[in-house]
Amino acid sequence: MGSSKRVTSSSQRTHRSIEDLRKRHSQELENLTLTTRPFKTLRLFILAIFEYFKQSIFYLFATGGWLLLFNTLLATLGILLVTIEGPHEKHVEEVSRYVRFGLWWIVLGVASSIGLGKNIDFMNNIYGI
């Protein structure tokens, strides 16, 4: 029986010390301002921003972020191919023409599906486009 009292009193002391730590922590948070403790405030702010970005990246990868990463890498590769000179320029120009041609027909299809087809024909006749 004596040992159960020791465990209970030890448990109560631990509980009190945890409560004391919580009270001290909340008091420190109340006193934590940029004017009173600028370095600690900035350090905690940077840590919070880092944690937010880390959670955001994990969320993105968990919900299809690999597709986003792949598209970003593909776009970066495309930009590099367009901006760097070399023997690939004629191929890039040919692909560019095909892409512009395809986009032109997609735009015409969307325009005609929302009822702008007649207006485009009318504009073509007026301005001779």
Image: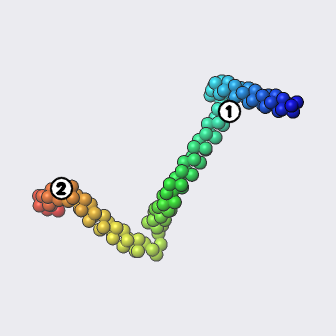
Circle nearer the viewer, 1 or 2: 2
Q: Quadrant of residue 128?
A: bottom left
Query: Would you say residue 8 is visible in this rendering?
Result: yes
Tell me the quarter of the picture where residue 104 sits: bottom left
Name the secondary structure under disc 1. Answer: helix
Query: Residue drawn at (29%, 68%), measured in percent from left and top?
Result: 101
The residue at the far front in this view is 1
Q: Could you tell me residue 121's position as x and y percent?
A: 14, 60
Rendered view: 34 above or below 105:
above
Q: Secondary structure at mark 2?
A: loop
| Residue 103 rendering spot, x and y as whole percentages | 30, 64
Q: Nearer the viewer, residue 27 or 15?
A: 15
Local crowd at mark 2 within 10 Å, few (<14), some, or many (≥20)? few
The answer to whether 17 appears left or right of 29 in the picture is right
Q: Is residue 28 left or right of residue 120?
A: right
Q: Count the marks: how many?
A: 2
Which residue of the protein is positioned furthest toward the right in this rendering?
A: 2
Q: Which residue is mark 1?
A: 40
Identify residue type, mark 1. Answer: Lys
The coloring applied to the image is rainbow
How far apart in space, not on screen, are marks 1 and 2 (Cα)? 61 Å
Q: Label 2 amino acid?
A: Gly
Is there any visible trace of residue 120 in the rendered image? no
Residue closest to the eye, 100 or 63: 63
Above or below, 78 relative to 10: below
Q: Position of residue 9 (x, y in %)?
A: 82, 28
What mark, if any, has residue 115 been given in the picture? 2
First in residue order: circle 1 vs circle 2: 1
Task: State whether residue 48 is above or below residue 87.
Answer: above
The residue sitting at 57% across, 52% down in the picture is 58
